[in-house]
Amino acid sequence: MAKIRIFSLANKLGLRTEALIKVLSDMGIEDVSPASAVDPETASAAVELVVEQAEEAHRQAQAAAEVQAAQEETRTGATDEATVAKEEWEEEFAPPVHDADLEEGLAELGQYLAELQAATEQERPETPEVKPLSELAARPTGERPDSAVDVPPVVTVLGHVDHGKTTLLDALRQTDVVSGESGGITQHIGASEVSTNDDTIVFIDTPGHEAFTAMRARGAQVTDVAVLVVAADDGVMPQTVEAIDHIRAADVPMIVAINKIDLPNADLAAVQQQLLQHEIVPEELGGETIVVPISALKHEGLDELLEMILLVAEVEQLWADSQGDFVAVVVESRVDSSEGLLAAILIRNGTISVGDIVVCGASWGRIRRLRDWRGKSVKTMEPGHPVEVVGLSDVVEAGEIVQLADSTKQARSLAEEAQDTERERSLMGQAEVQLRQLQRQFGAEQVKELNIVLKSDVWGSTQAIEANLNQLGKQLGEIQINVVHNTVGEVTQSDVLLAAASEAIIMGFRVGVSNEALRAAQDEHVEIRRYDVIYEALEDIRRAMIGMLEPIYEEQAIGEAEVLQTFESSRRGVIGGCRVTSGRMARGARIEVVRNGDQVFDGELSSLRRFENNVATVEAPQECGIAADEFNDWEPGDTITAYQQVEVERSLSGQAVESSSS
Ligand code: GDP
């Protein structure tokens, strides 16, 4: 039989390519890529090892399941079935593949592995599948249940500063107040409802792409239609272009409102021409984008704009389940001196009532009051509508998901869980998408596309860099490179949010990064890579593809502590009661203990306690208890330095890379 490519072999076995490459590496075969070909003997040997490893995983899962079953003193019967099934397979297939025709054996073997894996997974104790929060907030599709209700579309207004976004929102609200019920609006809550003859539209009151994308970055994309406001006298400006990219990245339908048509120097034709340059083709010019001329100030064209929004939003398809699991998205939150925290939320599904217990990230509470978008108190609110809730414990952020809990106990534990996850995430400080992990993620089939936000110093370079990246994308074939946004200027907070929301990395060419952007990059876990020349960036991507940007670990000091006093513990021996003086202490870290200038211990920090609890880390300036299995001789005044393996950036020059550019 001829040689077989690794990805094709993996495919036949129903394995991830990465897993097969790992197996080959266990066999001492390095330097292979998914496209490398191996001879039939090697393939057979690899297959045997795969089977062995799969069976071992199966045995371990079985053992774990047995332990759990014994603990729970319940019998499920699944283990026995799996064991019998496995024995049957073993009879049929053992020895898996030796000199039999590989091609023929592989398909059956693939099935064997798949079934083995399914059995293993069945036995593996508790790994419940959790739906990502952002998916919970998505619009339902499919069959409408009896409890379904029609819901209004949600609109966000974006555009360059001073082009009239706020004026437009005010004008729309006034139209509604004039045409709608009396009473007016006592206070904005963060979103408003505008009614036309038969329909309602919800407008998010915070205009601009920062808010729009921040919500998306936190997980929830609620906008059904984006209205891009362009002033007729000013035309397409830098923030207009940004807004266009943000809208496109969110894959939200767009309507262009050309505003200020009342001005004498309004030039509709010129604006349309500028839009063309950004590949927005107005209907009038034979394209698909609806363009509505308006004057927000003079209330002209607003009815047509609303009509077009309803048309684009495909309102007849929008519904929610009023009896379904409650999910809402935070639109805005603020603190009121008398009422505490107020959060405007948009209900996506289910109904909320005063007295319900809500959880939102690390914040939770019992609802004391609900207010509709006009500021009027209500007892309950149905899905599709914004509502202000009073009663949450801590500040929440736009885009966070709100759910209901059955009890305060459950709410507290959900909130604590969320807090722990966030803490872990920030301790790890790891970007969601990292170039140097691309190959691993790609191998694991998590990443097939690389999204990039590009920033460069001069206009001339932006196009050249994008063209080069696109060309590289074509050469690489297996992975698609998408430039989500490409402009000049330093890396801004808005770029970081866009990257977070689009799971992109940021590449900056000879540009700086604003402080706000640096902070946001940390908070949102976005990787920013800076380059001087395009060649370096292209090389980086190429190397990432072939796995040469695998991380390097280096031992670094992570913190210091001082022993204040010592305690005896029956289980742990002597414990040092310490204060962390800088950085942090971490369980499992290597520590050096120094007394009067001499090192008295060098080994592992095996137990770290804060009050009664075992903890993974303790940060300065907190106090903690430290114990080491191999050291009992603590004395007050000892200083402890902790070291950990920290992932460091590889420098390009530091790599032994065979030139792949020839
Ligand atoms: P934003 O920064 O996009 O929210 O813009 P604003 O709504 O604050 O509007 C900026 C300026 O443009 C204000 O002075 C508005 O009065 C003015 N403006 C907004 N819409 C119109 C319009 O349709 N016609 C005219 N002549 N001026 C407008």
Image (cartoon, rainbow, N blue to C red):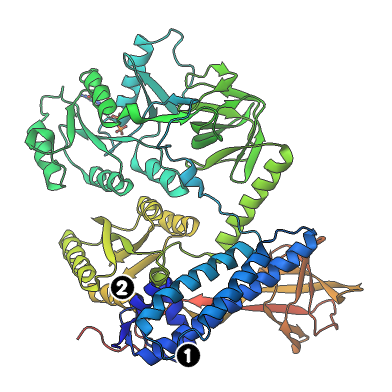
Residue shown at 55% from the left, 51% from the top = 130
The kind of secondary structure element at disc 1 is loop
Give me the disc on residue 541: 2
Q: Position of residue 39 (x, y in %)?
A: 34, 90
Disc 2 marks which amino acid?
Ile
Measured in 3D between alpha carbons, the distance from the residue under mark 1 to the one under mark 2, in whole angstroms, is: 28 Å
Q: Position of residue 306 (x, y in %)?
A: 27, 23
The image quadrant where one finds the N terminus is bottom left
Disc 1 marks which amino acid?
Met
Q: Is mark 1 within 8 Å of ligand 1?
A: no
- Residue 516 seen: yes
- Comparing 390 with 517, the one in front is 390
The image quadrant where one finds the C terminus is bottom left
Query: In the figure, residue 478 lies in which quadrant?
Result: bottom left
In the rendered image, the residue lying farthest to the top is: 182
Nearer to us of marks 1 and 2 is 1
Within 10 Å of disc 2 (Cα), the crowding (few <14, some 14-19, many 20+) is many
Q: Position of residue 251 (x, y in %)?
A: 30, 45
